[in-house]
Image: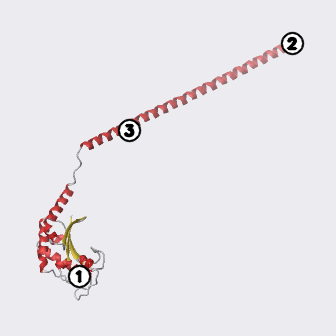
Amino acid sequence: MDTSSSSRRASAKRGHDHADHDSHEGHEDGRSDRWLISYADVVTTMMVLFLALYVLQLAKNKALEIKVFDAHVAGQRTAGAQPASSPAPALVQRDRARRELMASLAPLRETSEISVEPVAQGVEIAINAKVLFDSGDAHLRPASFDELSKVALALTRHSTRNILVEGHSDNVPIANAKYESNWELSSARAGAVVRFLVERGVEPHRLAAVGRADNVPLVIGDDAAARAANRRVTILVQD
């Protein structure tokens, strides 16, 4: 009988211990579940927030694109409605000065030995050397005074720009006691033209003279016609 009572008490104790163990495990599992639920809520909230910010940024970018497009269309309409822009006043004045100068020099173009042409730097007057000088000499021929006087008159009345006078020779070495090379001859001829223009009223500070010898040929070749064409004096009226 005592043995039976002892068995019942041991069995009851084991049951009580088992119940306490289950209750403890249930309590721990409950706290773990609540922690996981709280973490999931935070992650979900952050994802929703980031998604909302992303959608807002997309909306702003779209609005900016529409604004830029509308401004571009408005600019095109305005440009289409306006007349084409007129040339700059400086270009208009330069072109007018060129035309006036060339018109005043038109009588010189009646001879085939003198040309008047617009070039990139301005207006160029080219005079064949035989009109101005005797062969191998740098003294102006009296017969050239009329043509050079017309040039000087046009330069004083229709231009205030700088003027570059260049002497050019052929490629035949000069044999002259006065000029040792074509450099000296071409420089002396350019200087003679400058002196004449100054005497006829062209301001000295506008003028410069340089000899080019045969380094800037008008015609490439060694025949007599090419050499004759290359012997010249050019007067460049700069823009």
Q: Specify the label residue 4 is tagged with.
A: 2
Between 75 and 117, the residue placed more toward the observer is 117
Q: Nearer the viewer, residue 38 or 233?
A: 233
Q: Amino acid at mark 1?
A: Leu
Residue 40 position, x and y percent, is: 57, 28
The amino acid beneath tag 2 is: Ser
Regarding residue 212, the answer to whether it shows in the image is no
Quarter containing the N terminus:
top right
Horizontal side, residue 215 vs residue 126: left or right: right
Which of the two discs, 3 and 2, labels the residue nearer the N terminus?
Answer: 2
Classify residue 158 by image quadrant.
Answer: bottom left
Q: Find residue 187 and report its image quarter.
A: bottom left
* Closer to viewer: mark 1 or mark 2: 1
Residue at disc 1, secondary structure: helix
Q: State left or right for residue 227 relative to residue 5.
A: left
Task: Find residue 72 and report its horizontal and vertical position in percent.
Answer: 32, 41
The answer to whether residue 67 of the structure is visible from this angle is yes
Q: Which tag is nearer the camera, tag 3 or tag 2?
A: 3
Q: Which mark is residue 65?
A: 3
Q: Which residue is mark 1?
A: 185
The percent position of residue 92, horizontal first and vertical second, equals 19, 56
Badge 3 or badge 1: first in the primary sequence = 3
User: How far is disc 3 from disc 2 in space, using C-alphas?
Assistant: 92 Å
Q: Please count the marks in the image.
A: 3
Residue found at x 70% / y 20%:
23
Mark 2 element type: helix
The residue lying toward the viewer, choosing from 202 and 222, is 222
Q: Is label 3 in a helix, a strand or a loop?
A: helix
Per the model, the C-alpha gap separating discs 1 and 2 is 152 Å
Distance CA(mark 3)–CA(mark 1): 72 Å
| Dot label at residue 77 | none
Q: Residue at x 52, y 31 (%)?
A: 47
